Amino acid sequence: MTTAQPEGRLFIDGEFREAKSGKRYPVINPADESVVAYAADAGPEDVDDAIASARHFADTSDWATNREFRKRCMLQFQEGLRARADEFEELLIAEGGICRNNLWTHVRFMIDGMDFFNDLITSFGWEEDLGPYEVLGNPSERRVCYEPYGVVGAITPWNAPFMTAIWKVHHGLATGNAVILKSAPDTPLTAALMAKVILEDTDIPAGAFHAISAADKGIVGDAMTADQRIDLFHFTGSPGVGQRIAERAANGIRHTVLELGGKSANIILPDADLDMACGVGVMMCMNNSGQGCALATRMIVHADVYDEVLQRLEAMVGEWTIGDPSDPATRVGPIIREEQLKRIEGLVDRAVAEGAKVLIGGERADRDGRGFWYLPTVLVDVDENSEIAQSEVFGPVLSVIRYEGDDDEAVRIANNSRYGLSGYIQSTNEERAWAVAGRLKAGTVNINNSFYLSPDAPFGGYGISGDGVEHGVAGFREYLRIKSVASPSH
C-alpha cells in the first residue's frame, strides 16, 4: 500500500467522522485474508445525517444552476483522481483482489473518460425552445428544461468499486445533484479515498457528496430506500437487490436506474476465426477473475467447429493461472469472499452432477491455505436450460453450449435467458454478424474483437439485467427531470 493507513471513516456534510455507534469492521484482503484496514460501520442514524445534509444542500445551494462553477469542480475532481491513481490501484488490489494487469480499465481509463461528462455540463442543451403551437385558439411558445432530481442515492458493488462509483458520483454531481454513495461492505476504502480527493483537491461544497460504509448492506440500504428525501436511486448489483430497491422506491414514486448483471452469450458461428474467437472468448469470461456483469460466460458453438474450439479453450485457459493479484503477470486473482467461493463451487458441482463435463479446472485452488481461490474452469456439453447456463456465476467459469442448426438456432439459444446485458458474436462475415447482432436481446453487443465500453456509448440491459442506462447523453439524462414550460406567443 502506498498509504500507511487507508481512510475508512464515513464522509458526511464535508467531513470525515466515525459512525455514531462507534462501530468499525475489518476490510479483508481476499488474496490472503489479512486485514487491510477498518471501516466505519454506519447505522440508520448515520444515513439520516447524510440524507439531511444532502437534502439541505440540494434545496438551498446554487449547485444545480451554477454550471461554470460545477464544471470547474468536476475538472478539479478529475485531476485529483488522476494524481492519486496509484493509490486507488493499490486499494483495488488490496480490498478487491483485482489483478494489477486489469487495473488500467478500472482506474485510469475511467478517469480519462470523465472528459465526456465534464464537457456536457456546459454543452448539453439544458433548455430547448420548441417554437409556437396553437391549442383552442391560444398560440403558445414552449420550452423544455432539464433539471437535476436533487438527491441521488448511489449504491455500488464490490467487483469494480472505483469504476462503478466514479460513474455514479461523477455523473450525479456533474448533472447538478447531491450524491450519497453507499459502497459495498467488502470495498469501502475506495469510496473513502474518493471522498478524500473531494475534500482535499476540489472546491466541491460540503453537502454535495457523502460516502457511507457498513458491514451489513441491508440495514443501510433499507434506511436509504425508505427515506423519501432521496429522489433517485442509481444501483449496480444483483437482480434480486435491484428489484427490492425498485419496489421500495415505488413508495413515493422515486426514479431508479438499475444495472443488474448478466449471463452474456458469445456466439461462435461456423465461419469464425477460431484463434481470435477463442482468445476473445476466454479473455471476456476470465477477465477480473470472472467477477463482471457483462462478461461472456456462455459460449454457444456450432457443431462444425465444436471440437476445434474445445481444443483451443483447453490450451488457452490452461495459461490463465491464478496468483498474487499484485504481480503484473497474474491473470486470475482471488474470489471476493468465502461465501461467494462456496456459491461458485456449488454451481459447478451441480452442473457436473447434471451432465456437464469439466474440460479444465472445476475446483478450488489452494495457496498456502489462505485466500479464496477457484481455478479457471471450462464446462462443456452444457444444457442450455441448466442452472449453470441460466445463473450468473460471478467467477472464472465458462459454460460451452453446442448447437447444430443455423443462425436462427444460435440466436434462439443466446436469447434463452432472463438476462440481457451484453452479447458477443464471432464471424468473418461482417454482414452476417450485424444481422445476428440486430436480433440479440441485449443492451450491448460486441462483434469479434470489439468492445462497447466508452463514455459516450449508453450501457444498459434488457430483461432482468436492468432498467435505464449509464454513459452517453442518455446516461446524463437519467439524472435529470424534464419540465415543459409554456408562455403566450406574440
Image: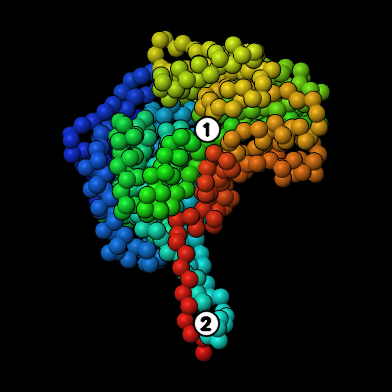
What residue appears at the point 81 percent right and 32 percent down from the top-left corner?
Answer: 406
The numbered mark at residue 50 is: none
If you read the primary sequence from the N terminus, does the residue marked by circle 2 or circle 1 appear first? 2
Please provide percent x and percent y for residue 110. 49, 44
Placement of 162 over or under 345, stated as above or below: below
Callout 1 crowding tier (Cα within 10 Å): few <14, some 14–19, many ≥20: many
Q: Residue furthest bottom?
A: 490
* Mark 1 lies on residue: 292
* Mark 2 lies on residue: 140
Residue type at numbered disc 2 = Ser
Residue type at numbered disc 1 = Gly
Please provide percent x and percent y for residue 402. 73, 23
Gap in Å between the C-alphas at discs 2 and 1?
50 Å
Which type of secondary structure does the marked residue at label 2 adopt? strand
What residue appears at the point 43 percent right and 25 percent down from the top-left corner?
Answer: 336
Which type of secondary structure does the marked residue at label 1 adopt? loop
Please provide percent x and percent y for residue 51. 28, 50
